[in-house]
Amino acid sequence: DHKAATISKVLIDCLAEWDIKRVFCITVDNATANSNAMDTFKEEFKQIGDDAVIQNGDFLHLRCATHIINLIVKEGLMEIAS
């Protein structure tokens, strides 16, 4: 499913499996569930240690620039077509 709690859990499980203990940022698209998942992930991943989330997680959630550009182009093409 695409719920925030599920996304966050999968991220934490993958990072644990890959033995990754510090994260600077994670890039995802602009879906609401992803934004909520990053908030949940930040709080849960901080429990690993004080330095698990670099820069206090201020830069943890990076929205995908190509997804944003894609949305802009699609909207522009729909305007041109109508």
Image (tube, rainbow, N blue to C red):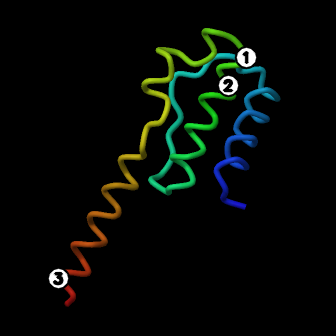
Q: Residue at x 40, y 55 (%)?
A: 67
Is residue 72 placed above or below 76 in the rendered structure? Answer: above
Query: Residue 52: where, in percent of width, then height?
Result: 63, 15
Question: Is there CB contact under 8 Å for labels 3 and 2?
Answer: no
Q: Is residue 82 left or right of residue 38?
A: left
Residue 4 in the image, given as x and y percentages of width and height = 64, 50
Secondary structure under the numbered disc 2 in the rendered image: helix
Q: Nearer the viewer, mark 3 or mark 1?
A: 1
Describe the element under mark 1 as helix, strand or loop: loop
- At x 49%, y 57%, the residue is 31
Horizontal relation, residue 1 to residue 56: left or right: right
Residue marked by disc 1 = 48
Pick whichever, 5 or 24, lies toward us.
5
Residue designated by label 2 = 45
The circle drawn on residue 6 is none
Look at mark 3 in the image and give the residue it sits on: 80
